[in-house]
Every structure is written in structure tokens, then in C-alpha cells.
Amino acid sequence: MVTQSRAARTREALIRAAAAELDANGYHGATMASVSAAARVSMGALTFHFASKRALAQTVVEEAAALTRARTGTAVAGYTSPLSAVFALVRCVAGLLDEDVVVRAAALLARERPKPVPGWHEAWVPELGRLLREADKAGELRQDARPDAVAALVVYVLTAVEAYRCSPVGEGLGAQAALERLWPFVWRGVTAATG
């Protein structure tokens, strides 16, 4: 039991160290040696858990997807307006980009390696699409705002916010703060006129 517990802690340390290395250096800049050193784990222990950098990156994406799925599910619960739930989901994703290195690494991998492993976008984009289709049926979207086009716009905005957060220009401005600056323009462009 102690050995299993130690192995689980080592694996978690390796995932977090890999995420930090990926976040800082990208997929091509991160190395197994740098992950090993950052986690303070031998290369033997690293390769016991993860045979390759690709396998390690896949696990980072899977961990980020599981966390994102759980957090966005909680964030949208209880909303009666589908469009309000969309905003809650988007804010949740932006918040995760700010606070969790594993999610940031998965987002970076999605940008750097379009098909590295399935996972992170699939953890929240289907729910975004579902909510937007519901918003359309409820008359919350403009007539010319197709749910699939609005979903694509939201993905573009979140990708831009994540990339901007990493850029020298955006340094110090988190994903949530950048999103808050952009969201009113998105909102006005896609919502149906009221009153």
C-alpha cells in the first residue's frame, strides 16, 4: 500500500512538472530530462511511468480534460438561461487557464500540436455547442447567429485570450481579465435584442 501511494505521488509530481515545463517551454522545448529534474525524480522512475514525451503529454491533456469537464459541469449547473450558462462555462475555462498549469499546458499543446492527443477541447466544446443550440431554441441568440459559428467564435476568443496571456504584450493580464475585456463585444454581437 505504501509503494502504491508513493508511485501515485511520483506520477502526480511528474505530471505537474511536465505541465510546468510544457507551459514554460512548449512541447519542443520541454525534455524528459528537464521534467525529471523538475520533479526531482530519476530518469528511470520517469520512464517507468511514461515511456515517452508523447505519452507524458497525452497524460497532461487527459488530466486537464478531466479537471475541465468537472469544473465546467459544476459552473453551468443551475442556470435557467442557456446563454448565461455559456458565459459561466467560458469564464470557468478562462479561470482554469489562469490557475492551473496542467490546463494551460493542455491548451498550449492544442495550439502547438493540432492533433497531439484527443482531449482538452473535447472536454468543454461539446457542452458549449449544446448550450448554444439551447440558447438558439430559446430565442436568446440573434437570428443570424448560428450556434456552430458562435461556438467557433468562443473557441477563437478563448484561444486568443490564452495566447495573449503568454505573450510579452499580455504579461500580467490573466485569461479571465482579458476575457472580461472582450466578452461584451461577443455578447452584443450574438444575443437577441431584448425589450
Image (cartoon, rainbow, N blue to C red):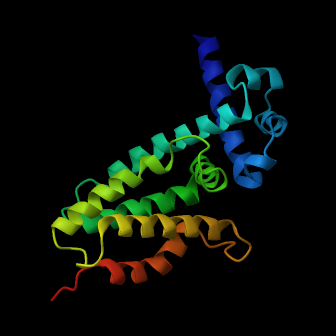
Task: Please tell me whether residue 98 is drawn above or below residue 32 in the rendered image.
Answer: below
Q: Residue at x 22, y 86 (%)?
A: 193
Whether residue 42 is visible = no
Q: Which quadrant of the structure image shows residue 184?
A: bottom left
- Looking at the image, which residue sits at the far bottom? 195
Q: Which quadrant of the structure image shows residue 48?
A: top right
Q: Is residue 22 left or right of residue 150?
A: right
Q: Is residue 164 left or right of residue 32?
A: left
Q: Residue at x 56, y 50 (%)?
A: 103
The number of callouts visible is 0
Task: Please tell me whether residue 190 is drawn above or below residue 72 in the rendered image.
Answer: below
User: Which corner quadrant holds the N terminus?
Assistant: top right
Spot occupied by residue 194 in the image (x, y as percentages of width and height)? 18, 85
> 41 and 26: which one is in front?
26
Task: Please tell me whether residue 117 is drawn above or below residue 146 in the rendered image.
Answer: above
Q: Residue at x 60, y 34 (%)?
A: 59
User: Which corner quadrant holds the C terminus?
Assistant: bottom left
Spot occupied by residue 97 in the image (x, y as percentages of width and height)? 55, 58
Spot occupied by residue 188 in the image (x, y as percentages of width and height)? 34, 84
Spot occupied by residue 21 in the image (x, y as percentages of width and height)? 75, 46
> 80 and 185: which one is in front?
185
Whether residue 3 is visible = yes
Q: Residue at x 50, y 62 (%)?
A: 94
